[in-house]
Image: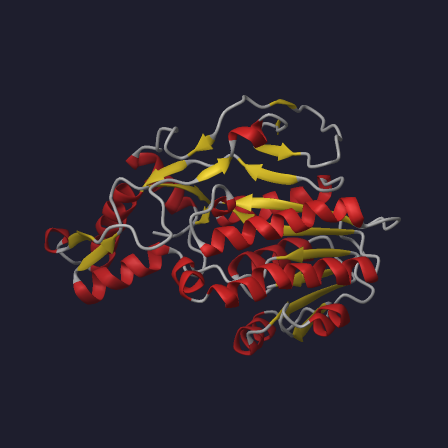
C-alpha cells in the first residue's frame, strides 16, 4: 500500500498511460489523485467514467504555465510527469512548440516540485531520446538531462527525481494499430514506412508497472529502462490485416501494403541505451538502471554488458509471439 493516504499528481493524467496509472494507484486508497491536463473534453469523459471516486480531483492546465503547475502541486507527495508533445511529425514541423511543452514544461515541473517539497517525481521519456534524429527525441533527451542534473543543483531539497524510458506502447493514443485498422476498413490498404523497420514494443501494463516501480525504487537522478521485445513492422502490418479482415468479414487478399519510405526524423531502428551509457548501467531481471550521479545499489543488480542496446541487434519476436502479445492486451 505504497500510496495509501498519499496525495499524487498525474500530469497528463487523461492520456492512455495516465489513466492506467490512476487506476493502479487507486487500489492503494490514496488520500487524493490530482489529474492535471489541458484536454477539457477528456477530463469530462474521465469524470463520468469514475464519478463514484471521491478522491479524484481534476485540474485544467498546461505544463507551459508554471503558475498552474505550481498550484496543482501544493501539498502533493508524488508526481508522475507524463504530459508531452509526442507525435514525431508534428514535433518535426513545429519544433518551437515541442520545446515549450517537452523541455520548458519539464523545467516547470521540476521547479514546482522543489518549491513545494514533493517527495518524488518520475518523468516518462522515450527510446527516441537515444541518438535522436528528430525534434521529439531531442526534446525528450534534454528533459531527461534536466531531471538528472537537478540532483546536482537541488541543494538541501530532499525531492527525488528520476526518468523512465519507454518504447512504443501497444494500443496507446497515436499508436499505429488503430490507424492500420481504419485504413483497412475504409481503404483496403495500409501504408507503412518500411516493412523491415524494427521497434521496441511494450504493453500498457508493462508501461504502467515500470513507471510505478521507477517511482518506488528511485534514489535520485536515475533513468530506468525496461527490457522490451522487438517487433518487425511488416509482421505487425500483416497480423493487423489478418485479424481485422477476420473480424470485419473482409477478404484479406484485397488488402494491400504500400511502403512510403522513411519520413523526416524517422529511423529504421531504435535504441534503448548507448554504448557510453552501458559502461555505468546496472542490469536487473526486467530493466536497466542508469544511476546518474547517485551510485546507489539495487538488490540483485549486476553490471550491464558494454554495448549499444538497439532494436537492430535483437531478433524480433515471432509472428506467433506477436499475436499472443496483442491478444493478451485485447488489441486484436
Residue 7 visible here: no
Which residue is drawn at the image coordinates 51% and 59% (left, top)? Answer: 16
Residue 161, x across and y down, in percent: 72, 48
Instruction: Please give left or right for residue 111 compared with residue 19 in the image.
Output: right
Choose between 186 and 200: the one closer to the eye. Answer: 200
Examine the image and state in which quarter residue 79 appears.
bottom right
Residue 234, x across and y down, in percent: 25, 43
Choose between 43 and 126: the one closer to the eye. Answer: 126
Instruction: Please give left or right for residue 236 compared with residue 207 in the image.
Output: left
Which residue ends up furthest to the left in the rendered image? 254
Which residue is drawn at the image coordinates 55% and 56% (left, top)? Answer: 17
Examine the image and state in which quarter residue 224 appears.
top right
Which residue is drawn at the image coordinates 73% and 73% (left, top)? Answer: 67
Choose between 252 and 78: the one closer to the eye. Answer: 78
Examine the image and state in which quarter residue 100 appears.
bottom right
Vertical arrangement, residue 42 with respect to residue 291, above or below: below
Residue 17 visible here: yes
Q: How is the image coloured?
A: secondary structure
Vertical arrangement, residue 133 with respect to residue 173, above or below: above
Vertical arrangement, residue 107 with respect to residue 306, above or below: below
Choose between 56 and 299: the one closer to the eye. Answer: 299
Instruction: Please give left or right for residue 183 compared with residue 39 in the image.
Output: left
Instruction: Please give left or right for residue 260 compared with residue 90 in the image.
Output: left
Residue 53, x across and y down, in percent: 68, 68
Amino acid at each position: 500500500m505504497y500510496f495509501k493516504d498519499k496525495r499524487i499528481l498525474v500530469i497528463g493524467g487523461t492520456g492512455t498511460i495516465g489513466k492506467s496509472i490512476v487506476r493502479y494507484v487507486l487500489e492503494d486508497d490514496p488520500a487524493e489523485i490530482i489529474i492535471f491536463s489541458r484536454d477539457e473534453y477528456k477530463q469530462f469523459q474521465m469524470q463520468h467514467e469514475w464519478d463514484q471516486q471521491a478522491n479524484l480531483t481534476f485540474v485544467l492546465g498546461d505544463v507551459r504555465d508554471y503558475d498552474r503547475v505550481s498550484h496543482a502541486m501544493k501539498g502533493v507527495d508524488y508526481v508522475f510527469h507524463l504530459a508531452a508533445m509526442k507525435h514525431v511529425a508534428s514535433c518535426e514541423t513545429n519544433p518551437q512548440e515541442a520545446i515549450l511543452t517537452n523541455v520548458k514544461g519539464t523545467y516547470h515541473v521540476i521547479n514546482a516540485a522543489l518549491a513545494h517539497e514533493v517527495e518524488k517525481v518520475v518523468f516518462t521519456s522515450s527510446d527516441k531520446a537515444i541518438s535522436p534524429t528528430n525534434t521529439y527525441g531531442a526534446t525528450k533527451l534534454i528533459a531527461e538531462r534536466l531531471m538528472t542534473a537537478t540532483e546536482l543543483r537541488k541543494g538541501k531539497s530532499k525531492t527525488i527525481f528520476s526518468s523512465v524510458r519507454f518504447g512504443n506502447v501497444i494500443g496507446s493514443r497515436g499508436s499505429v494499430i488503430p490507424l492500420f485498422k481504419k485504413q483497412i476498413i475504409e481503404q483496403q490498404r495500409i501504408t507503412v514506412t518500411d516493412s523491415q523497420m524494427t521497434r521496441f514494443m511494450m504493453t500498457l501494463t508493462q508501461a504502467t508497472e515500470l513507471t510505478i516501480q521507477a517511482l518506488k525504487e528511485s534514489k535520485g537522478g536515475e533513468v530506468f529502462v525496461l527490457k522490451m521485445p522487438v517487433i518487425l513492422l511488416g509482421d505487425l502490418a500483416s497480423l493487423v490485416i489478418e485479424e481485422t479482415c477476420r473480424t470485419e468479414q473482409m477478404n484479406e487478399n484485397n488488402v494491400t501494403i504500400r511502403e512510403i519510405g522513411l519520413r523526416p526524423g524517422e529511423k529504421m531502428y531504435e535504441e534503448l541505451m548507448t554504448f557510453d551509457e552501458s559502461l555505468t548501467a546496472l542490469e536487473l531481471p526486467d530493466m536497466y538502471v542508469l544511476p546518474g550521479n547517485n551510485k546507489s545499489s539495487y538488490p540483485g543488480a549486476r553490471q550491464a554488458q558494454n554495448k549499444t542496446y538497439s532494436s537492430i541487434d535483437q531478433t524480433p519476436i515471432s509472428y506467433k509471439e506477436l499475436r499472443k502479445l496483442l491478444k493478451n492486451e485485447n488489441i486484436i
